[in-house]
Image: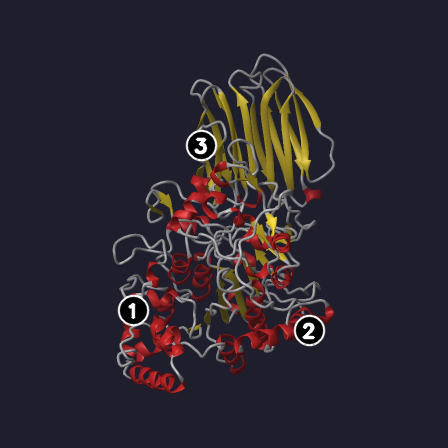
Amino acid sequence: MAAEWSRRRVLGAAAGAAVAGSLLPPSLQRALAADAARPARGGEGPADIRHVVVLMQENRSFDHYFGTLRGVRGYADRNAVELPGGRSVYEQPGLLGLGTVLPFPVRAAAAAQKKDLQYIGALDHSWLGGAVAWHGGWMNGWVTAKTAATMAHYDRQDIPLHHELADTFTVCDAYHSAIHSSTSPNRNHLVSGWTGFEPSGARAVGNDAYEEDTHTGYTWTTYPERLEKAGRSWRVYQEWDNFTDNNLEFFAGFKAVARKALGKADGVHTMTAFYAKAAGADEAGRARLQALLEEGVAGLDRGERSLFERALRRGAPGSTATAFAADVAAGTLPEVSYLVPSAADSEHPGASSPAASATLVYRVLDALGGHPDVWRHTALFLTYDENDGFFDHVPPPVPPPGTDGEFWQGLPTGLGIRVPMLVISPWSVGGYACSQVFDHTSITRFLERWTGIAEPNISAWRRTVCGDLTTAFDFSRGRRQPAVHRPGAVPEFTGRWSPWPPLHQALPRQEPGSRPARALPYQPDADGGFDPGAAVFRLAVRNAGRASAHLALYPYAKEWDAPQHREVHGAGEWDVPVKGGTYQFTVTGPNGFRREFAGTARGAAAALGIATRIDAARRTLHLTVTNPGRAALTLTLGPLAYGEAAPRTVTVRAGAVRTVAHDTRDAHGWYDLGLTVAEDASFHRRLMGHLENGEESVTG
């Protein structure tokens, strides 16, 4: 009851603070206002950060939480892929392929089933279940793998604090979990850069480490150990019940320290077993156990004791946020903090709720806002380890077959499904979206850049495809936050349940409008033409950005059996086989990039060449049409979105070349164009994307 009362008390404080329409703690509101009043800052960078706080919650997908959020890649995504057969990725085949299930609101299901929307239950989130949902990249196995409840989603009314944080700070809408699997391997990526192998020799793609009495521990080095060796300060904040979410406890070095510290503690050998025994004992029994633990800790050498206190010591129930706040107030917050909530605060759909977890987030924000001198030098990453079994429509980038360290049982280990990521700091204020591709290793890469301490466990492929999160920050200024809705109270727990889709389904409506967008390090492009002699489509791919762009090709005319993947930095070629004289494939990439190609070997436009050139400085897309045939062709280029310009029709004589320019400046660099040929109904091109010019923009 004490923990429940505490949660209610904090949410009550939040409600009292919401007179101005904000859920944020008054202390943080004041800190933000003070930041906005300060003169514009210059010359700052990651070096101005003194504290990095990582709060990783449990088991929510991006669409599940933010699919309806304004201005992100959600349910109104123009770049959503099609499934084989032509349906949208949002129209998931029902169980055994029968029927169709669309995303549906939890609130409506709760009303129909007379349940509380905060307490939906967990779904399958295993390695094999993840592979079935992903289905070779086609993304059409969700209901089969997870049940129809996979399609349930929340919106602003249900999770107002999460939405206000997105509107106030920066939301990353291309942030992925690290692996198509459960909690433990994802958290391995967080604390060490990868998930290696179990003591048995199998790949660590499940929660095997939870069998702590028999699991001998992972043997590769963690990033906190590298921080320790370098003399940098760090700490795990946790309590007796840490929901087995502190993965450092599963590594051999930390296991050895724990065994030594517990040497006299009545035969228990793991911290989980010790605190479980303490929780079940009476007051005298707990005191005796604690004394035995302290006796063991006293016997540790200096290095072992440091590892114990930083990574293994657990506070009393309900103390995680309190301990964090105490260090903030005392000026002893370490450089790197990992917050590991209890089950009740974890946001896990089998043990917690969004409303309950919001209390922990509120208290952490209140602690930082209450000490502006700390807040002004702190970056907080709020993310989720995996998607549970909840649907997300964005196919994750995956490596080409054979990529070292990134495959197991013939399947890519990652990237996993998108999860929410909120970057909360003085340098990420403004309600921005950052659409660079990230995963959990990106947090460690941010720490690398900030501390100068390398993490060699991160694979070369992940370093190529994922960023280091620095693009989510603007170190030149701060901005005020907008006002949003009042908070709600934490409801009484009434049992877990599984939401059913409604009888009459419709695609959810995403909030209208855009949001400011961080500049991205991509500039992808793709063009090409059919080569009848070789029976291939010669696809040229390019990327003039400073970071590699991951392109995926979806072969709808069975050019291949499954989607293909390519990292592009510079220029390259991609020969697409054309079978039976017909091709139809789509190439997608970061931040809305899309090219659609369709045609036949016998059509009048079969030999037509379409080349594109990007003028980033002028934000202009140039299309050059080459007609090597014997007859003139009539082409129509029309905008499908981003403006009201009339379609343009041009005639390209036999043997002639024509260039057409499309100006995107009025659309902030966005374009979506369709190209058809009057003499060849089979010919189709679609060109969509965003022209980056190095400046912040808006989302499409």
Question: Can you name the residue that lies furthest to the top here?
Answer: 630
Residue for point 50% across, 30% down: 556
* Mark 2: few/some/many CA within 10 Å (<14, 14-19, 20+): some
Q: Is 489 left, or right, of 316 in this rendering?
A: right
Q: Which of 271 and 498 is in front in this view?
A: 498
Q: Tag 3's secondary structure?
A: strand
The disc labelled 1 sits on which kind of residue? Gly
Image disc number at residue 253? 1
Above or below: residue 97 compared with residue 326: above
According to the picture, the residue beneath numbered tag 3 turns out to be 574
The disc labelled 3 sits on which kind of residue? Trp
Q: Is 499 left, or right, of 668 in this rendering?
A: left
Give coordinates of residue 127: x percent, y percent: 39, 50
According to the picture, the residue beneath numbered tag 2 turns out to be 17
Disc 2 + disc 3, Cβ < 8 Å? no
Give coordinates of residue 63: x percent, y percent: 56, 51
Q: Tag 1's secondary structure?
A: helix
The disc labelled 2 sits on which kind of residue? Ala
Q: Tag 2's secondary structure?
A: helix
Residue 518 visible somewhere in the drawing: no
Q: Nearer the viewer, residue 143 or 47?
A: 143
* Mark 1: few/some/many CA within 10 Å (<14, 14-19, 20+): some
Quick one: label 1 or label 2, which is nearer the N terminus?
2
